[in-house]
Structures are given as C-alpha cells and as structure tokens.
Amino acid sequence: MRKLLGGIAAAAVLMTSSTIASAGSILNDIAETGELRVCFDAGYMPFEMKSKKGAFVGFDIDIGRMMARQMDVKYVPVNTSWDGIIPTLLTGKCHMINAGMTINAKRNMRVNFADPYIVIGQSILLSPKLDGKVKDYRDLNNPKYTIAAKLGTTGEQAIKRMIGKAKLNVFETQADATLEVQNGKADAFIYDMPFNAIFSSQNEGKFIHLEQPFTYEPLGWAIAQGDMDMLNFLNNYLRQIKGDGSYDRIYNKWFKSDAWLKQVQ
C-alpha cells in the first residue's frame, strides 16, 4: 500500500510539474514573438470581411486589433477556410479563433471556449404598424399574425417551435421574406440577429428591429485545450472591454450603423 501511495504521489508531482511547465504557454509565445495570431474565415458579415482595398475589417477584427494593442503586440490575421479552422488552431498556426464561432458540445470536445462575447440567435424585423404592440416573440404567438421566414433556417425552426400559433410563410431568400413585410403581407420576419441589424440600418423606417435574440446561439473565442492562463486572460479582457465602454463602441459601429458597407461593396 505504501508503495502504491508513493507511486501515486510521485505521479501527482510529475503531473503538477508538467502543468506548471505548460501553464501560460500561449501568453508566453505571444510575448516572445510579439504577435497575436488570430484565425478567422473572412466572409461572415459583419464579423470578418475583406474590404475593397484588400484589408480585413469587421466586428471581430476590431476586437482582435484592440486586444493586440492592449497586449502591446502586433495583430496578425490568419484567414483560413472554415472547415479547417480548428485544425489550424491546434497545429499552432494561430493563438486563438475569433471568428463568430458558435459554442457547442462537439467543438468544445476539441477546444476550450472563453465566455460568450456575443449572443446572436434569432431576432425580429417587425412591421412599423405593430410598434409598441409587439414587444417580443411571445406577442407574435397569435393566429392573427403572419410571420415570414427563410426556408430551412433556424428562424423557421424557431417559429414552429416557439411561435406555433402564428401563420408561417417561408421563402427561398431573405429578400423575398423581408419584401413580404414591407408590402404588408406579413407582420414580421425572423432571422439571424446580425443580418437583421444590418438590414434594418439599410432600410431605416421600414422595419422595427427587436434586436434582443430570443434563441440562444452564443459565440465564443476558442483556444487549444489545457491553457487556463490564456482562458483567464480572455475572460478578464472581455469583462474589461464590456465594463469600460469600448465593446459598445465597436458593437455600435458594426451593428447599429451601415456606414461600413461602403468599405466592402
């Protein structure tokens, strides 16, 4: 028994030493190289895109650049295909994924996620005639209302699951569905919050955007598993920027204004 306990104790010491040796390895590498390498897949508006001048722009890009400035290192964008983004992280080609990635159980088996930095979910583009009468999705759960959705989307699924009493009309495209609301043939359009935020900015006065998502689709920054120091850094960074107002300034730039569209169109 004593030998067994001694062996267990020795193994614990080795494991502790190994943990200490590897602790903070991502932060150490960032400090030593003077670079914060960030993976994303440009093309998810307004999170990460390529401008007409060839520069990477977007909500995630601004957050990442600000993070690098506060770390006093260079921001290095690593644009990669979505299907290869986790392998790119795990082979060490970037320090983190900041790419509008939804947190889910399958991905969490391969990477660690920091706390969600934004929740997108489904939001509502409402006909102006219902301003003040409909305050959230529950108010639409009535046979007198008609809701438009894009075929095969999580919006369509959410309506069937949560607003089943309303009449549902599905369309092949977002354009057709939103036009139905504009023409008075539907009372609301339900779709991903980022699209609705941008579309309502482009069509000011034509819709009321109830921007609080009513489904939970959290997005998080991902890192390789096993580095609690980096995870701690990211969670503290997120708390800081949400507390000092800098997060809100970047959010408003990309989600409550369409001035940036001229950069990419």
Image (cartoon, rainbow, N blue to C red):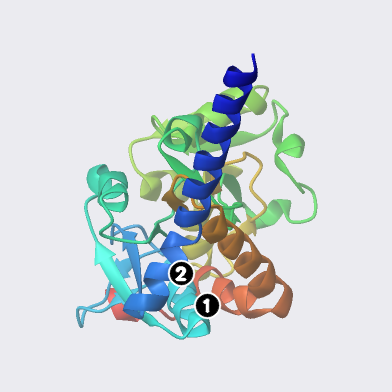
Disc 2, SS: helix
Is the C-beta separation of discs 2 and 1 under 8 Å? yes
> In the picture shown, does residue 230 fall above or below 179?
below
Percent position of residue 70, x then y: 53, 83
Q: Residue at x 64, y 19 (%)?
A: 2
Q: Position of residue 180 (x, y in %)?
A: 47, 45
In this view, the residue farthest toward the top is 1
Q: Quadrant of residue 13?
A: top right
Q: Which residue is mark 2?
A: 59
Q: Outermost residue toward the front?
A: 2
Mark toward the viewer: 2 or 1 = 2
Question: Residue sitting at 43 percent across and 69 percent down?
Answer: 28
Measure the C-alpha gap from mark 2 to mark 1. Answer: 8 Å
Q: Residues within 10 Å of mark 2 (few under 14, many from 20)?
A: many
Residue 213 visible somewhere in the drawing: yes
Q: Nearer the viewer, residue 195 or 170?
A: 195
| Residue 104 higher or lower than 165, as above or below | below
Residue 253 marker: 1
Q: Is residue 22 left or right of residue 56?
A: right
Q: Earlier in the sequence, mark 2 or mark 1?
A: 2
Residue 221 visible at all: no
| Quarter of the image where one finds residue 244 | bottom right
**Vertical comparison of 221 with 161: above or below:** below
Q: Amino acid at mark 1?
A: Lys
Whether residue 50 sits left or right of residue 231 in the image: it is: left
Residue occupying image coordinates x 28% and y 56%: 92
Q: Position of residue 67 (x, y in %)?
A: 50, 76
**What is the quadrant of the N terminus in the image?**
top right
Left or right of 76: which side holds 258?
Answer: right
**Residue 44, picture quadrant:** bottom left
